[in-house]
Amino acid sequence: MQITDQYVANLNEYFKPEQPLSAEQYGEIIEPFNEFYRSVLLLHVCEGRSLTEISAVRDSNVMRIQQIFGKAERLMKLRILNAGRRYVSDYLNETEGRKMKILNIHGYHGSPKNSAYQALEALGCEVIAPALDYDNTSPDRIINDLKYILADKRPDIIVGTSLGGFYAAVISAMCDHPVMLVNPFLMSFLTFDGDIRPHKDIKALIGLFGSLSQIDTSNVSCIVGDNDELLGDHKFTEELLGNARFRRIPGGGHSGYTLPLKDFFAELLPYYTDTLPRKEMAEGFPGLDED
């Protein structure tokens, strides 16, 4: 397809390839995208249209547009890194050993440098750890702030603990982003007698909870303690997010310090650096025939 010079400049600015790519290269990279995915990507990146505006143009709901853009952006990054190579393994071999960039979302009244942060840092990851004020910030504002960090810092994976696990799961559902969850407090609209007391905007929390029906579990890994004194047995968590990467720890409590987080991350980070990229590239562009 034809890519204008202005589109080339915007694509190079947004995706920041090691060497600027040409119009011809971007044309080849974008060619497999169907018209719907291609238009969402180019309207947002090259024409500066917001995802809300695009949803009106395409007569589709905003969450669907967010999911489409998240998938298209991630596959674009893979194809840009793999430009000029024939095999997916070439891309994987070149990026092997690259420091993983993680967005770590702490729990209610938790420290940004919590147990998950410490485990990830010990494994050599680059960890982005914002401090969130759950008491005085609305749920929608928290989501918008996290989306801004996601767009600005471009982490490979989001890690969320407890209430932070709820927000991480919501972002994953909305933006189709890889996520690792630690004792996630998915039903955050509930109030417990313990230390977890989310923002009082219950209606907003219920709305965000509804978005979890759209989560792609291939993006998700989860670890829970089966003796979580605040959230119980996590049966609902397992029903919603259970897969081959769901880990239940006998005797584990709510605190991440009661769970073998370093072992969990060490075991499953390779899924996100190897298995998931291979799957997405081998499948081409899953869902691209949908509108």
Image (cartoon, rainbow, N blue to C red):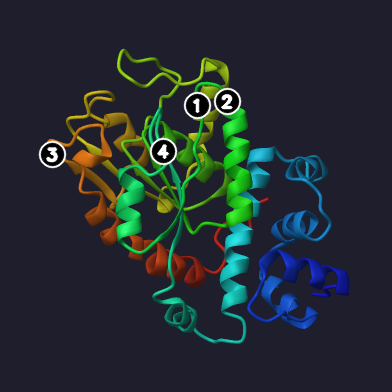
Label whose residue precedes the other's in the sequence (4 or 3)? 4
From mark 2 to mark 4, how far is it between C-alphas?
15 Å
- Residue type at mark 3? Pro
Q: Residues within 10 Å of mark 3 (few under 14, many from 20)?
A: few
Secondary structure beneath disc 3? loop
Picture coordinates of residue 189, whole percent (x, y): 45, 19
Q: Can you see residue 198?
A: yes
Label 3: which residue? 250
- Residue type at mark 1? Tyr
Label 4: which residue? 106
Quarter of the picture holding the N terminus: bottom right
> Relative to 196, does residue 4 appear above or below in the rendering?
below
- Residue 137: assigned label: 2
Residue plotted at (28% across, 25% down)? 231
Q: Residues within 10 Å of mark 4 (few under 14, many from 20)?
A: many
- Closer to the eye: label 1 or 3: 1
Secondary structure beneath disc 4? loop
Residue plotted at (49% across, 28% down)? 209
- Residue type at mark 4? His
Residue contact at pointers 4 and 3, CB within 8 angstroms:
no
Give the residue furthest to the left. 251
Residue contact at pointers 1 and 3, CB within 8 angstroms:
no
Secondary structure beneath disc 2? loop
Snapshot quadrant of residue 79: bottom right
From mark 4 to mark 1, how far is it between C-alphas?
10 Å
